[in-house]
Image (cartoon, rainbow, N blue to C red):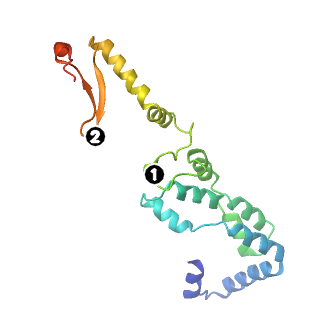
């Protein structure tokens, strides 16, 4: 996109043209630097597209990890450019924000290999958020959790044969025989 933009809108200011030529000349004369930068940039993904997805709330966990992968390149590229002498390359390395805070949040929050879709679950790293961990535990131990609720309701209501059941039509429901009908709380 940048190359296309620069071709469609070429520089017209002589000072800027000469500055760009110097930076290109420096990269052309330093084969090792050029190749190291090229190698680092091969893992850089389309940040503009990824950021658009985040802005519209359609980014997946894999795309968030892709952003972290791209951000991880920034410190190394900045370090490589730090020894350059041309005005334009110096300005570039000074302006690079390493985005370590964003990288840190994504790395702490999202598992290394997240699922393709959010609805599959399992994208938030264990230990990142205590509430998510609690809900995950409930989901993983649903039978024991439901049995715990059933026992608690039996004790609170005094209904010995109270059962919590589940079906596809109603979901979870509480079942009480008619002989205990007078013990059923109004909250049911």
The residue shown at (66%, 63%) is 96
Tell me residue 114's x, y (percent).
Answer: 55, 51
Whether residue 11 is visible here, answered yes or no, is: yes
Residue 63, above or below 169: below
Q: Quadrant of residue 162?
A: top left
Q: Secondary structure at mark 2?
A: loop
Whether residue 85 is visible here, answered yes or no, is: no
Q: Secondary structure at mark 1?
A: helix
In primary-sequence order, the first of circles 1 and 2 is 1
Disc marking residue 168: 2
Disc marking residue 154: none
Where is mark 1, residue-wise? 118
State how many labels appear.
Answer: 2
Tell me residue 127's x, y (percent).
Answer: 57, 36
Q: In the shown orientation, is residue 101 left or right of residue 140?
A: right
Q: Is 133 or 49 nearer to us in this picture?
A: 133
Q: In the shown orientation, is residue 28 left or right of residue 150?
A: right
Tell me residue 48's x, y (percent).
Answer: 53, 68
């Amino acid at each position: 996109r940048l190359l296309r933009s620069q071709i469609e809108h070429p520089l017209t200011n002589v000072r800027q043209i000469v500055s760009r030529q110097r930076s290109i000349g420096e990269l052309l004369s330093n084969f090792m630097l050029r190749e190291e930068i090229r190698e680092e940039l091969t893992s850089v993904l389309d940040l503009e597209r990824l950021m658009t997805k985040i802005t519209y709330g359609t980014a997946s966990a894999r795309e968030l990890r892709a952003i972290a992968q791209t951000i991880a390149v920034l410190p190394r590229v900045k370090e490589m450019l730090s020894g350059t002498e041309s005005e334009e390359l110096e300005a570039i390395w000074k302006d690079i924000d390493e985005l370590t805070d964003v990288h840190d949040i994504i790395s702490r929050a999202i598992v290394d290999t997240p699922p393709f879709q959010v609805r599959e679950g399992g994208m938030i790293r264990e230990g990142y958020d205590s509430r998510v961990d609690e809900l995950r535990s409930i989901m993983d131990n649903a039978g024991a959790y439901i049995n715990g609720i059933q026992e608690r309701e039996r004790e609170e209501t005094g209904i010995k044969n109270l059962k919590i059941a589940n079906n596809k039509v109603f979901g979870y429901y509480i079942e009480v025989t008619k002989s205990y009908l007078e013990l059923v709380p109004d909250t049911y």
